[in-house]
Amino acid sequence: MNLKKEDKLYQWLLLLAMLLWGGGWTALKILTYELPMNVIIFWRFFIMSVSFLPILYFFKEPISLNKNSLKYILSSSVLNIAFMVSSFLGIKYGFAGAGSVIITSLSPIMTFLLVAILFKNKITSFQLIGLIIGLIGGYVILELNDISLFFNGSNIYFLLCAVIWAGVTILSQKSHTHIHPIHYSFFISVVSTIVAFIYSFGSDLSAVFEQGVNFWIALIYLAVLGQTLATTIFFMASGKLGSQRTSSFMFLVPVFALLSAWIVLDEPIQMHIVVGGAISMIAVLFINKR
């Protein structure tokens, strides 16, 4: 396959990955109707861990664990569980499409702020403009004109998700010098499964086997298609197309999430979410401008 055709293939695969990621929020919403949070979280991470095994076999990369890689795996596992708890609560009491837009559009801004604070990075004029635009987008998307809506609704959970994911992003970037990304994702899911099992001890984990077809489609979609497969495609495409081109596809995730929630769940497409999300995405473009 020549270079142009290979690039085209990875672009189509990336489009598929963004579609799968976007649909994951709708799948999670379906799961919140059926069983308690701790049961869903355990099975999500367990199925995800198992689904990584054929991918590990396919890559055939030698697994190497050391003190540094374990440090990143353990800390990221804690953040991943915290993210799953916050997103579950946000989606349970709010809209799946809205949650995706808030988290996807605000987490890059939160990541930039955390990096600037923790590593004392100098902020350029373009980045400063981006931050100001991002604050405006956040104000619109979170409906901060009515502060009671923010504290009484699901938006506070979605904002917490954006902050947590910013931490996950920073740890993930730092971990690449110590462990292969696929191994990193696999061990995070394994550690998260163990922690979720301990937390769920005494709960009826077998209750999933009493659920219907829709539940299992949503669970397998969330764990395998929306996580393992989409993440693997993203990592592979990053290596072929470069991180900058690959990251630009992330702007499609909230679009697919809104559409899937509208089609499957009949959720309304709220104008303040669309406008605030668009403003926040413009902010990300300014922040990333060199």
Image (tube, helix red, strand yellow):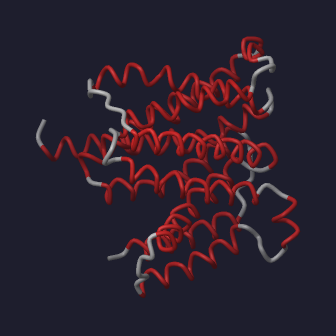
194 relative position to 152: left or right: left
Assign the N terminus to one quadrant of the image. Answer: top left
Residue nearest the viewer, comparing 71 with 106: 71
Q: Measured along the vertical axis of the image, is residue 261 above or below residue 160? A: above
Q: Measured along the vertical axis of the image, is residue 215 above or below residue 134? A: above
Residue nearest the viewer, comparing 58 with 141: 58
User: Quarter-wise, where is residue 14 in the image?
Assistant: top left
Residue 253, percent from left and from top: 52, 51
Name the residue: 48% across, 40% down: 73
Residue 55, percent from left and from top: 36, 24
Residue 104, percent from left and from top: 56, 57
User: Quarter-wise, where is residue 144 in the image?
Assistant: bottom right
289 relative position to 75: left or right: left
Residue 133, percent from left and from top: 56, 80
Q: How many marks do you count on the picture?
A: 0
Name the residue: 41% across, 37% down: 184
Assign the C terminus to one quadrant of the image. Answer: bottom left
User: Quarter-wise, where is residue 231 in the image?
Assistant: top left
